[in-house]
Amino acid sequence: MKRVIILGCTGSIGTTALKAIRTKHLDLSVVGLSAHANESQLVALAREFSVKAVCLTGSVLESLPNIQTYSYFSGLKQMLHSLEADIVLNAIAGFEGLQASLEALSCGFDLALANKESIVCAGSYLFDVAKENDCRIIPVDSEHSALAELLKGHERNQVQSLVLTASGGPFRTLDASQFSTITVDQALAHPTWNMGKKISIDSATMANKALEVIEASYLFGFDADRIEVVIHPQSIVHSMIRTFDGAVYAQLGTPDMTLPIINALGEGGTSLVRPLDFSSLSLTFEKPDFKRFPLLALSFEILNRKGSSALAFNAADEIAVHAFLQRKISYLKLIEVVQRTLQQRWDEEVASFSQILALDEKARQLARSLV
Ligand code: NDP
Ligand code: MG
């Protein structure tokens, strides 16, 4: 049985993973769990899955009978180093997930990675750490999971471009003149996916797709001019690849993160997802509107600029989304904060974790001053 550690187990991805494992159809046993603030749910899950160790990264966790407890991020590091495991599912939300990814890799664990911020912020440095430790990074993001599956069937030199699908979010059809009236509740109401708050707001601004364009480039080694985004409101086609002979290959399925999660955990053959009913399907595709969703356009510029722009984009977006969720700034101001942070030059290439931390803090300070 494969031993898995789930970081961020109380969130949307974490609970979907645990729900799948609860069915007992997967050859997986959970040995460690982490959450940040939700102590009661963490403790309940630790007991239910009889894990060896748990960590609460946001505060002190009291001791538990028969389960080793750890606190704060230093505790998470200790927990990862003390456990024997085969794979870590990193479902932590935000930049903090990067340090967890690096620790998991340094312990020699394969990484099922939902935390796209790890890839966006560390870029090739993350993959170098994985290589040094002989570990695999397997994407959990549905689009990248689909792309990884599709690329298995093709030589790299046959593939012209990666085509990421995007639902378009709740404001896909909203006229730009209405953007100034957008509320937090409207932005949180995603039409097809049920997710954590940060990624839901990112889907409304299309910053999520921007992060995913960058994620795809680093994961699969494709430059900006070989990555396309197509709006597909039904979220049934999870992504596509275009080959030079003119063919397009797609992965289809119900919008349910269970499949990409269990694929990343190496249990993809198991049927836990509702089969697709073709009789009720009506699939549509549209060109993305880069004018109404400028953060998406920015991701292609970022890839062309190289340096540490991607890291700055992530930091500014985290600050701006947080301020928007706290109702301190409007939807349009959120966009402006990210754009203005990226007006500064971010030329430094990322080569170490301490440098990543320093650049992230610099971008956050700038974004905060713009809020
Ligand atoms: P949620 O907000 O639902 O859950 C986040 C999890 O991380 C919770 O367990 C939370 O603990 C923990 N956490 C929050 N802050 C910290 C911190 N500072 N340090 C350590 N742990 C922390 O997020 P999602 O599940 O939606 O997303 C998780 C990741 O997966 C993100 O990177 C997201 O972009 C990515 N992703 C999500 C998808 C989805 O469908 N939801 C799809 C594709 C990718 P607590 O509950 O105790 O606060
Ligand atoms: Mg996605």
Image (cartoon, rainbow, N blue to C red):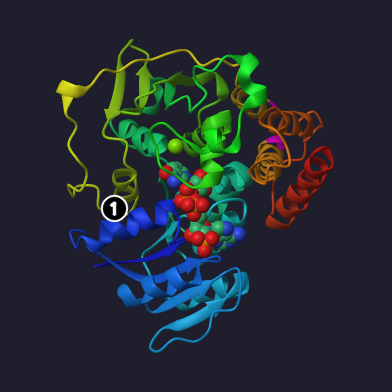
Q: Residue furthest top?
A: 246
Q: Residue at x 27, y 56 (%)?
A: 20
Local secondary structure at mark 1: loop
- Residue 253, x across and y down, in percent: 26, 33
Q: Which residue is mark 1?
A: 266
- Residue 335, x across and y down, in percent: 69, 29
Dominant SS type (magenta):
loop
Relative side of 239 to 368, left or right: left
Residue 111 lies in what quarter of the image? bottom left
6 part of magenta stretch: no
Q: Is residue 331 at least partly visible in the picture?
A: yes
As drawn, 30 above or below 237: below
* Quadrant in which the C terminus is drawn: top right
Q: How many marks?
A: 1
Mark 1 beta carbon near ligand 1 (under 8 Å): no
Residue 307 vs residue 43, the one in the foreground: 43
- Callout 1 environment at 10 Å: few (<14), some (14 to 19), or many (20+)? some
Residue 14 lies in what quarter of the image? bottom left
306 part of magenta stretch: yes
As drawn, 191 above or below 104: above
Q: Residue at x 52, y 38 (%)?
A: 188
- Residue 139, x across and y down, in percent: 42, 45
- Residue 87, x across and y down, in percent: 38, 61
* Quadrant in which the N terminus is drawn: bottom left
Relative side of 267 to 295, left or right: left
As drawn, 134 above or below 123: below
Q: Is residue 102 at least partly visible in the picture?
A: no
Relative side of 282 to 61, left or right: left
As drawn, 366 above or below 59: above
Q: Residue at x 77, y 43 (%)?
A: 363
The span picked out in magenta is 305-309
Q: Inspect the image, locate mark 1, and give the three-letter code of the amino acid beneath it.
A: Gly
